[in-house]
Amino acid sequence: MELANSRFVPASQQRTWNKLIAPETLKVCITGCETLERVADNEYLVGLRADVGPVHARFKGRLKLTDMKPPHSYHLQFEGEGGPAGYAKGDADVVLEPEGEGTRFAYKAHADLGGKLAQLRPDQAEKIARKMTGNFFSLFTVCGDKT
């Protein structure tokens, strides 16, 4: 599955970057996130409960930020395992650019699904992923700032 989009964030590029790499912000903004623990610089263990279409499960996973160019861009690798529900793994490129009084947050992501998750129709999986991404941005825009 491939997703690409951009959103306007009403905050400076530096403030947007700071929020984007802050574990406490990510925990609040990732739908269903129950735990987010730093295990190394720019690497986190994640526990989340996800309702993905007909699949309901708890996932344990890992997020890793690489190729960081503050406050402009980074590469994100992710993987999550949900037992019988299946797995998701992939990567994303994130780019922040100043735009007027705020920041343009662009992303391009690729994800592979396995197990029950892979049984979702492609259009259904994409719709769910877009909804989760929309939730992330809605929460990200209003959650507390770390400067």
Image (spheres, grey):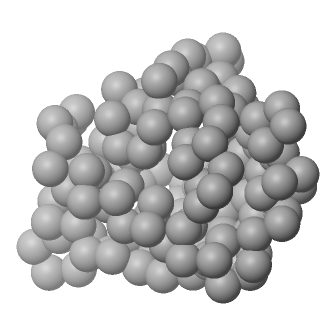
Q: Quadrant of residue 37?
A: top right
Q: Is residue 125 left or right of residue 13?
A: right
Q: Is residue 141 left or right of residue 33?
A: left
Kindly tell me whether residue 75 is visible in this rendering: no
Which is nearer the eye, 141 or 146?
A: 141
Q: Quadrant for the N terminus, please.
A: bottom right
Residue sitting at x 19%, y 42%: 143
Residue 76 position within the rendered picture, expressed as x and y whole percent measured from the top left:
66, 51
Residue sitting at x 55%, y 34%: 49
Q: Residue furthest right?
A: 115
Above/below status of 128 relative to 117: below
Residue sitting at x 23%, y 67%: 9
Kindly tell me whether residue 49 is visible in this rendering: yes
Residue 43 position within the rendered picture, expressed as x and y whole percent measured from the top left:
66, 28
Above/below status of 50 relative to 16: above
Residue sitting at x 78%, y 51%: 88
Number of numbered discs visible in the structure rendering: 0
Residue 52 position within the rendered picture, expressed as x and y whole percent measured from the top left:
60, 55
Which is nearer the eye, 84 or 2?
A: 84
Q: Residue furthest left?
A: 101
Q: Quadrant of residue 53?
A: bottom right
Residue 41 position within the rendered picture, expressed as x and y whole percent measured from the top left:
62, 23
Q: Quadrant for the C terminus, please.
A: top left
Q: Quadrant of residue 116?
A: bottom right
Which is nearer the eye, 73 or 7?
A: 7
